[in-house]
Amino acid sequence: MTYRTLYISGLLLPALIFCAVNLHSQEATSKPTPPSAPFIQKAPSPGQWTITFSYPEEHQPKVAGAPAAPPPDLSGRIRTITVTKVKDIAHVEAIRIEDTKLEEWHSGTTVYAKTNGTDIYAQGSEMSEGNSPMSTSSEFQDMKWVTAESYLGTIKYSGHDCLIFAPNAPATLKISDADAFTKFVATAPLVAFIDAETRYPVEVRTGGVYRDYQFSDPPNSLPLPTDLVAQIKEGKRQADLEHQRAPRPY
């Protein structure tokens, strides 16, 4: 009887050790549980936010001892976009790297656009803006890939507790391994850092372009500029003249 008990124990002990090791291996490679949805909140309205862009040429690693490379030519590219929304009025201002400016005023569904050095606003419809970077939409429409499947975990980043999302990340990636995570995000085509509390984006990387988001309180009111108001009034006056009936000859 004693021999049988010892023999059974001798078989069970290795089995228990194997199960424990196997369970630990599964836990180490299992994906973290995503937080509750929504993963990204709509931008505030009324609200104000600024997106600062940086480009792959600006992220090239510096080689020790190598001569300083000339600054990349990024002419024409946007450095910042600031969106301000109050009621049915929105203002979008884009500053290019060479310091030229493009601005839009949105009044209802009508858009008035003007570039640096011009005095006249071109008029268009908000319906045609689509996914333009000048969009005033509160939806972050180009971030549909931020899903439970792309969730990697939570880390401290840029002063925020951030939810990290990256599609098709290696199953073995541990974001707690700072070196491995840094190497991964340096080349990953899509990475999003989302504030865990507000659920607003902190930084989004798409194809090597970094977008840094800053949210702030909007002004109490947002009147259209005086030159645009004058242009709208003049346009209405001209339209009224064109629609007036010609005077009768008698």
Image (cartoon, rainbow, N blue to C red):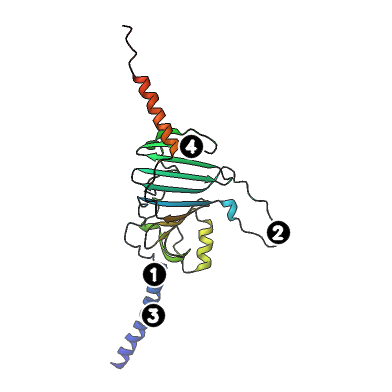
How packed mark 3 is, by other alpha carbons closer than 10 Å (few <14, some 14-19, many 20 or more), is: few
Image depth: mark 2 or mark 1 in front: 2
Say what amino acid the circle numbered 4 marks: Lys
C-alpha gap between disc 3 and disc 1: 14 Å
- Assess whether mark 4 and mark 1 are in contact (beta carbons under 8 angstroms): no
Residue pointed to by mark 2: 66
Per the rendering, the mark at residue 17 is 3
Picture quadrant where residue 21 is located: bottom left
Residue found at x 34% / y 20%: 243
Sequence-wise, the earlier of marks 2 and 3 is 3
Residue 221 percent location from the top left of the image: 37, 47
Judged from the image, the secondary structure of the residue bearing numbered disc 3 is: helix
Residue pointed to by mark 4: 114
Between 84 and 61, which is closer to the camera in this rendering? 84
Say what amino acid the circle numbered 3 marks: Ile
Say whether residue 170 is left or right of residue 85. right
